[in-house]
Image: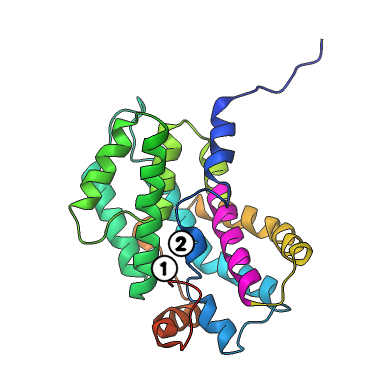
Amino acid sequence: MSSMPKIGLPLLQLLHLADSAVPIGGMAHSFGLETLTTEGILSAEGLESFLRDYLEEGGTLEAVFCRVASRLVGQSHNSLDSNRGLGINDRLSALKLSRECRTASATLGENFLLLVLRLGDFPVLREALEAARQTRIGIHHSPAFGLTARVLAWDEDDTVQAFLHHSTAGLVSACQRLLPLGQTAAARILWNLKPAITETTRRSRSGAFEDATCFTPLLDWGAFAHSGLSTRLFMS
């Protein structure tokens, strides 16, 4: 009898929570892309190349912090290194230069954990959320996703790939509302970016959060200037 692939609940849960339609408020944020499209800097034709560059810089940063956060949970899945977790979160905040992007990331992180906590009883995640609420920052989205990964026994590489796919899909979706970008073209862009997502995941394996850096001046400027736009569809 030929062997059959193992059917597992963790994979289904990962697919569920990495869906771009998961209700955490992601549709409200463009992370600076609205400014770039309004100013004519970003076009539908250049979007795929732009997102490929984003994955190399910003995507790698988020992947490292997602991966490192998943290792904060003990082997028993019921203990958490809270102090180290807050240090990791502080470091990621320092690397997010614009207030709007910091706020957006922290809002999505808290909303994500609140959603998971409404789906089941996960004391470690509740502890992480309560600890983050005692700070001025809150918990960012990628570490929140990473913590959930370990609690729900998701594979580490699968987790990072899923998070990157989720966040990239969110940026493509934002551009569908900002640019002449149809559903088929959007699907093609996301399909073509999958090798870049895989490569970003691979790069993050050797990344240490203490050494993590990110250089995205155009996106940073877009986020800084967003509040000055005469009309806005997005919060960031």
Q: Which residues are magenta?
A: 162-178
- 191 relative to 7 in the view: left or right: right
Residue type highlighted by circle 2: Leu
Q: Locate the C terminus and report the quarter of the image it occupies.
A: bottom left
Question: Residue at (25%, 54%) from the top-left corner?
Answer: 87
Residue type highlighted by circle 1: Thr
Residue 122 lies in the magenta-colored region: no
Q: Which residue is mark 2?
A: 61
Closest to the observer: 31 or 192? Answer: 31
User: Which residue of the protein is positioned furthest toward the right in this rendering?
Assistant: 1
* Numbered tag placed on residue 213 in the rendering: 1
Q: Is residue 59 above or below residue 143?
A: below
Secondary structure beneath disc 2? Answer: helix
Q: Is residue 172 above or below residue 206?
A: below
- 182 relative to 90 in the view: left or right: right
Secondary structure beneath disc 1? Answer: loop
**Residue 229 x, y percent position in the rendering:** 45, 87
Closest to the observer: 149 or 22? Answer: 22
Colour logic: rainbow
Question: Residue at (17%, 52%) from the top-left corner?
Answer: 134
Closest to the observer: 215 or 107? Answer: 107
* Numbered tag placed on residue 80 in the rendering: none
User: Which residue of the protein is positioned furthest toward the top in this rendering?
Assistant: 1
